[in-house]
Image (tube, helix red, strand yellow):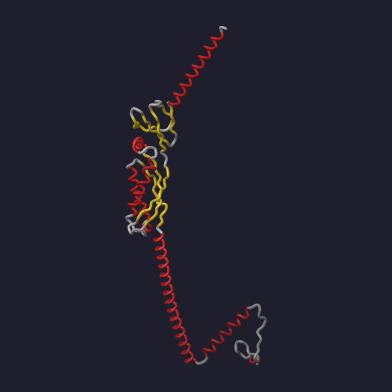
Amino acid sequence: MAGGPAAVSFLTNIAKAAAGLGAAASLLSASLYTVDGGERAVIFDRFRGVLPETVTEGTHFLVPWLQKPYIFDIRTRPHNFSSNSGTKDLQMVNLTLRLLSRPDVDHLPTIFTSLGLEYDDKVLPSIGNEVLKAVVAQFNADQLLTERPHVSALVRDALIRRAREFNIILDDVAITHLSYGIEFSQAVEKKQVAQQEAERSKFLVAKAEQERRAAIVRAEGESESARLISEATAMAGTGLIELRRIEAAKEIAAELARSPNVAYVPSGDNGRMLLGLNAAGFGR
């Protein structure tokens, strides 16, 4: 029976040791926190408030219950939002803006104190709409298309400057979509159709003018050719006409001679060839 109290005492000691180890493990676990890659941490102390230092990546110690870490994602994140803005000539324009933003790591305690963890959702949509409306109001509706690079540059510079006031860094700002109201789109389409019709009318007028000039030149050439032939005939008699007829006959005979489908050329008409010569005269 002496072994009974000893066994109970041994088990009690083991239970106490296990409880102590468990408490120590819980305390150690509560005293450690990990900051992953692409993240930073801000420590809130119950007595001192938000500590001014930013905690970098790795595993770190803190005082349980007294301190609590808040993790920030410092990687660049995209944001898209749309704005319906009025132009200088009172036309409504729908624009979609894309931003790539990240927090200023050196000012994370300030961001946490003033804006919290969702700082970008609180700031970027409001300043984006503000800047878009201010910039678009400086241009007419058609200038937003013809001067789009200039408009984008103004929006980008203004947004970067406004975001820096909230310790937010913008890596890129771009206008990804631009559309007009139905009335303005229809007016632009009608204007383009009218311009195309005007250009087509100009082309038809120019074509008719060119055809008229060509007809005049062709008529003048035919008239001059007829005059020259008439003068040559008056000076040389019908000899020129006979020479042209002989040359034409020679060309026809040469073409027929080269053709594989012609075996012979019949004399016909009392032996007269295409040359207009009497074949019987060569026999004498």
Identify the residue at horizontal 58%, vertical 84% (top origin). 250
| Residue 51 x %, y % | 35, 31
Q: Nearer the viewer, residue 119 or 275?
A: 119
> Which quadrant would residue 216 be assigned to in this image?
bottom left
Q: Nearer the viewer, residue 264 or 160?
A: 160
The mark tally for this picture is 0
Q: Nearer the viewer, residue 163 or 271?
A: 163
Relative to 51, 210 lies left or right: right
Q: Is residue 135 above or below residue 40?
A: below
Q: Residue at x 61, y 90 (%)?
A: 277
Residue 23 image position (x, y, % from top left): 46, 21
Residue furthest to the right in view is 263
Q: Nearer the viewer, residue 187 or 207?
A: 187
Horizontal relation, residue 172 to residue 283: left or right: left
Give the image quarter of residue 215. Answer: bottom left
Residue 190 percent coordinates (x, y): 41, 65
Q: Is residue 168 above or below residue 271?
A: above
Q: In this image, 266 relative to 246: left or right? A: right
Q: Quadrant of the C terminus?
A: bottom right
Instruction: For the N terminus, give its image quadrant.
Output: top right
Q: Where is residue 21 shown, x and y percent of the image?
A: 48, 20
Position of 113 relative to 82 (above/below): above
Query: Residue at position x 35%, y 28% from top?
Result: 46
